[in-house]
Amino acid sequence: MHRTPVFITGAAGFIGSHLARACLAAGHDVHLLTRPGSDLSRLADLRANVTLHCSDLNNQGLLRRILAAVQPEIIFHLAANPRRPRQDNLADLSASLKADIAGFVSLLRAAETLATPPRRMIRAGSLAEYGAATPPYREEMREAPLTVYGASLLAGTHFAEAVQPRLAFPVDTARLALVYGPRQSTDYFLPLLISRCLRGEETIVRRPHDRRNLVHIDDAVCALLAMAARDGPGAIVNIVGPSAPTMTDVAELVREMTGADGWQIVYEDGHGQNGTTNLDGSGARADQLFGWRAQIALPDGLAQTIRLFRQHLLEHDTASGGVVKHSDRTLSGALAP
């Protein structure tokens, strides 16, 4: 029986590790690319069943050798850094150019050298590419990114469209809403909020009126697999959840579901903050092209996530002999980006 060779960049991350599990469950031959020095804890239970490769995407020679050995039919490009902090000397722009844009171009070049080209490449984009455009975002809109992250992903989208006639394989861009679920780092607001509510700690919601479209990780992975399975030319496709609640709605739902006290969530007015206030998109094209719609409602996705967070915290606290407190009780804001 043929096992489809699948190659995933950014595999040590939240989405990449979940996608790797789904590809294994589907019977694929799974190859994972991680950067040197990556935290591989999310892959600990998978390592006996996948092939792990370690390389910087910009190491063109090594990347070509890895792809030549793998001969992937499907490439998922998920490597990106949405949490790069602003720097006064604009060094964050240079870092984004090297890691996000140059890394993607390097992957395209390496894939193009294969004697048998991949059947398809799917790269992760973001609703942040639309930025100041009027929501709900649609794929045919003129984008107006407001962050370096959104701008770098948009540059990758434009590169893919510009060189598509020169490529031997189609490239899809999955413009993901804000993905949430188990194993997500508390560097992000929703898992941080859940963790602090469960621990009896305070969280400040700095932009309570902002709206963010939220898609559960299981829905997002299903969408990526559906994109990989389809035929046809490359496309830009929004991958969005069923709703775009306010941050107040999200915080109150988490507070209720965790049993947290009212004092644990403090709301600021959000005035003077920059960035998109309403991050929402239309999912019509995904439904039209490959019949995908998000299936997991926010309360159901949060219930699953909270249950697994509660289990993890209980196991961690038991192992450490007591409750471990966060040192910063007020580090939060609207859900990134």
Image (cartoon, grey):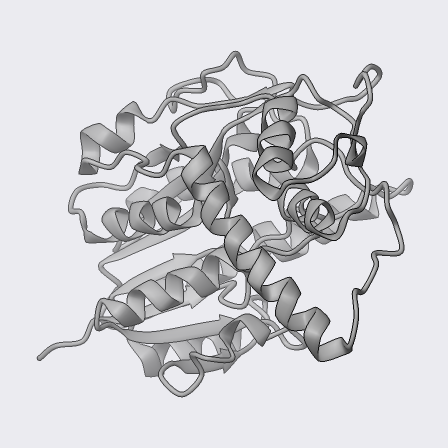
Q: Say whether residue 135 is left or right of residue 294.
A: right
Q: Position of residue 173 (x, y in %)?
A: 39, 42
Residue located 81% across and 16% down the image: 269
The answer to which of 251 and 161 lies nearer the viewer is: 251
**Front residue of 108 and 84:** 84
Q: Residue 89: where, in percent of width, then height?
A: 90, 43
Q: Which part of the image, by quadrant, shows the C terminus?
A: top right
Residue 116, located in which quarter of the rendered image? bottom left
Q: Position of residue 333 (x, y in %)?
A: 75, 34
Visible in this render: residue 159? no
Q: Quadrant of residue 206?
A: top right
Q: Is residue 183 left or right of residue 198?
A: left
Q: Which residue is nearer to you in this view: 72 or 261?
A: 261
Q: Residue furthest top?
A: 134
Q: Name the residue located 51 percent from the left edge and 61 percent from the top edge.
A: 106
Q: What percent of the width, then of the height, locates residue 203?
A: 79, 38
Q: Is residue 333 above or below residue 314?
A: above
Residue ID at (70%, 31%)? 334
Q: Considering depth in this image, is 14 or 174 the residue closer to the camera?
A: 14
Rendered view: 133 above or below 155 = above
Residue 191 relative to residue 11: left or right: right
Left or right for 263, reference 293 = right
Residue at screen point 39% across, 20% down:
138
Locate the N terminus by quadrant: bottom left
Rendered position, 295 above or below 8: above
